[in-house]
Amino acid sequence: MGSSRESRDDEEYDLPLFETKESKGRVAYRLFSVSTFICICLILVYRVTGLADGAEFGETRRWCWIGLLGCEIWFTIYWLFTQAVRWNLVYRNTFRHRLSLRYEEKLPGVDIFVCTADPTIEPPIMVINTVLSVMAFNYPSENLSVYLSDDGGSELMFYALIEASHFAKFWIPFCKKFKVEPRSPMACLSNPPTAALNSQEWSRIKILYEEMEQRIETATKLGRIPEEMQAKHKGFSEWASVASQRDHPTILQILIDSRDPHAVDVEGCKLPMLVYLAREKNQQHHHNFKAGALNALIRVSLEISNGQIILTVDCDMYSNDSESIRDALCFFMDEEKGLEIAYVQYPQMLRNISTHDIYSNSLCVIYNVELRGMDGSGGPLYIGTGCFHRRETLLGRKYSKGNPLRIDTSVRKLCEGSVEELEDKSKALASCTYEENTEWGNEMGLKYNCAVEDVLTGLSIKCRGWKSVYLNPERPGFLGVAPSTLGEALIQHKRWAEGHLQILLSKYNTFLYGHRKISLALQMGYYSQDCWCLNCFPTMYYLLIPPLCLLKGIPLFPKITSPWFQPFMYLILTKYIYSLVEFLHSGGTLKAWWNDQRMWMFRRITSYLLATFDTIRKLSGFAKSGFVISSKFADEEVLKMYEQDKMEFGTTSPIFTTIIATIALINLFSLVGGLKRVIVNVEGKVLEQPLVLQIVQCSLVVLVNLPVYQGLFFRKDKGRIPTSVTIKSVVLALSVCIITSYLYL
């Protein structure tokens, strides 16, 4: 028996630590893609050859026709970009047991960075649940260091972290003893204990957590720290010199020193290093938002723990799988293919998705299709959270085949010196002036001057010769919080789209910066997201001009009896059928797919449109860059609507709602006017009607906007569209339709 097992271990010892599989149906998809391209070309031919037709409608039709040709040329280009991320999908699997077999006694140090910025919209209790979940990874505690970057410089956040450091002594051994998943106390203890858990111990740990939660919530509500706690911990004295959130010296406290023999849990096992950092803030120096915070953490951690692997997570993204570190190490430590891997990216999965994902927060097609496609072409982009990095790649090191960067499997040595000495030395690394006349934010660390600094950083790493890996296991590695209002969802996409457009218009434009550095397919994959904003103009055109031309009786598409009708019909049918199949295959539902269609339209006409204008203003010097943090909670009534999959318009920015409602009403009025025109003139010859496709398009837009009409005219709850916005939208839509009907455009 023993020799048989040893024989199997010997066989496993030389096998790869991960495998890569190509997606099934690749040939079938490529044939479908070719047929789609042929139809697109036929439609473009129809547009070009039709420029001289329709003289009876004068110059109006001609200019509308030219506009449609321009839109369709752009949609063709963008469609080609999207094909690059669907042409070569790959799936990754890891073999943790092989990793343990070879490296269990010499695993590398891992430094974990958790970032928070505002205790009012990122509640301390949520933040420490994330911290506790990553402290409890199934990984040697002496090789684990957790850093909380508090860009809000909040005394409340520091107090919450102290409470978490005490609770960790009970929580970590409890998780490891009973193999608890997930290891966020809030997520784990909200469910009844399983059969594998000891009910007494579960009840005891739940009481301890609730007592800690109560203390933190009370302090948060009162806005002050209990006096007895302030007297116990020297760290609170640091706040004596804090003038405001934007003006304070570096505050750095090592709350758990894993080198200390007394830093143990209730079972006598070592605890991970735990560090609090609020970098120096000064209104005379730009702090560069999250990128600046992460760069300060990279330097400070280099001085304190110097882990070779760095994990970055947002404060709401708790660990959902305690084995995630080991999965990531399977890529970094693979002897053959791991040497060129710079980072391992997990998807940004969310735990509070409504039943049918009313705001399309899950982005399931992006995470299950597009990032897998980028992985097959050189690696996914870095999305800022749930990502494991080699430290050296974040420090600007280039990949070299002749001198590969190996993970040092010798037992790491923590930096020497007392806690006070380490804190004093490290504070200077997080000062405002440290980066002056250095390459930080340029060639070292995360990039600055971009709303999606993570994406830009990942691109620059790849352009230095590295590759990345996308891992989307059956059990999500990390779970975060989705926006629960329409406004938050649209603002989040506005920020993302604005950042991608900044990349497109900068020296880091992927086709220029990545030329001969990364594959053409990967460049196109980046472009499929960098060009999000550019879709706003052709989409607006398509949502306005064909309906208004329908109202006016101007045909823009072929008759049903025309041979040119066939490529249009093929494209419409296959687009929606393929989109639905892809969405269902990615784990969505039919209703969620319909919601997804609506939200992509909303994003294009609001988030992307406003992001484009704001980017132009910033590049022209008329506005400054900012960073909007998504709120992590909403009131009870709003949450109830979200859970019921009811769209909430009441708290959404008026400019977003006005645009959405006005376009929805223009399509509704145009459909009514167009149907009236067709019914009066049809005379039994439906197939000869040249307006059929415009009616179909307008009908689809009206159907997808049904929640908008309900919010405008029928709903009486808090989530309805405000009366002022309703009046404004109705007046605007009627004005446009009346002008179109009675004036010769």
Image: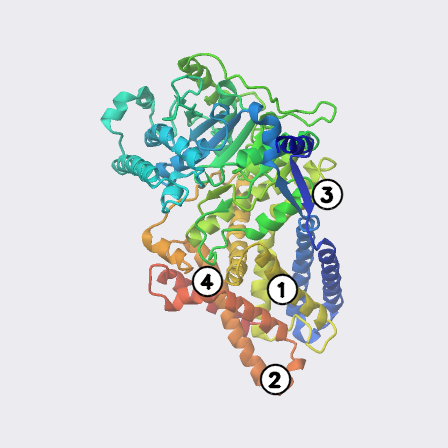
**Residue at the image position 47 percent from the left and 26 percent from the top:** 141
The secondary structure type at the circle numbered 1 is helix
Residue tagged 4: 661
The secondary structure type at the circle numbered 4 is helix
**Residue at the image position 62 percent from the left and 75 percent from the top:** 692
Give the percent coordinates (x, y) of residue 393: 61, 28
Gap between marks 1 and 4 measured at Cα: 27 Å
Gap between marks 3 and 2 measured at Cα: 51 Å
| Mark 1 or mark 4: whose residue is earlier in sequence | 1
Give the number of the mark in front: 1 or 4. 1
**Left or right placement of residue 579 versus residue 150 in this view:** right
The residue type indicated by label 3 comes to Leu
| Mark 3 or mark 1: whose residue is earlier in sequence | 3
Using a 10 Å C-alpha cutoff, classify the residue at mark 1 as few (fewer than 14 neighbours), some (14 to 19) or many (20 or more): few
Residue tagged 3: 520
| Mark 3 or mark 2: whose residue is earlier in sequence | 3
Residue tagged 1: 577
Using a 10 Å C-alpha cutoff, classify the residue at mark 2 as few (fewer than 14 neighbours), some (14 to 19) or many (20 or more): some
The secondary structure type at the circle numbered 2 is loop
Give the percent coordinates (x, y) of residue 587: 55, 55
**Whether label 1 touches label 2, CB < 8 Å:** no
**Whether label 1 touches label 4, CB < 8 Å:** no
